Amino acid sequence: MARATIQVRSKGTITLPQSLREKYSVAEGDVYSVVDLGRGALLLSPHASKMAALLDDVARIVVDQGVSLDTLLQALDEEREAYYHERYLEARPIPR
């Protein structure tokens, strides 16, 4: 297990050593959860966005299925149009 010393700066800012940032692909703006383990021990773990995970799944499926960007965009347009009609046009009462 690697060890490093870090210092808490103003406003609680800490800087992770470059070697750890590179090893774990930590980038500016990444979000992490902190768990208090007690006795001053903290666990820092990536807080993965559910949306990012879903988008990764979609990207993997698109590549595996050989779907082109044009086909994907066309399907999204068709779904958006169908949703609009179902949600706003068909649900509207007919004026008398």
Image (cartoon, rainbow, N blue to C red):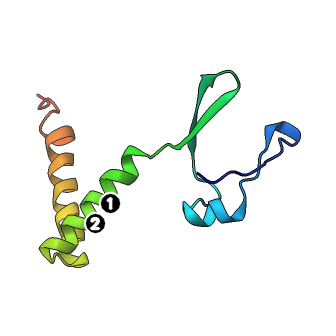
Q: Which percent across, then down, holds residue 54?
A: 30, 52
Q: Which percent across, then down, holds residue 95?
A: 14, 30
Picture disc at residue 56: 1
Q: Nearer the viewer, residue 75 or 42?
A: 42
Q: Mark 1, residues whose alpha carbon is within 10 Å: few (<14), some, or many (≥20)?
A: few
- Circle 2 sits on which residue? 59
Q: Are circles 2 and 1 on residues that touch, CB within 8 Å?
A: yes
| Secondary element at tag 2 | helix
| Secondary element at tag 1 | helix
Image-based side of 34 in relation to 12, left or right:
left
Q: Quadrant of the C terminus?
A: top left
Question: Outermost residue toward the front?
Answer: 1
Residue 41 vertical position relative to residue 23 in the rendered view, above or below: above
Q: CA distance from mark 2 to mark 1?
A: 5 Å
The residue depicted at 49 percent of the width and 43 percent of the height is 47
* Amino acid type, mark 2: Ala
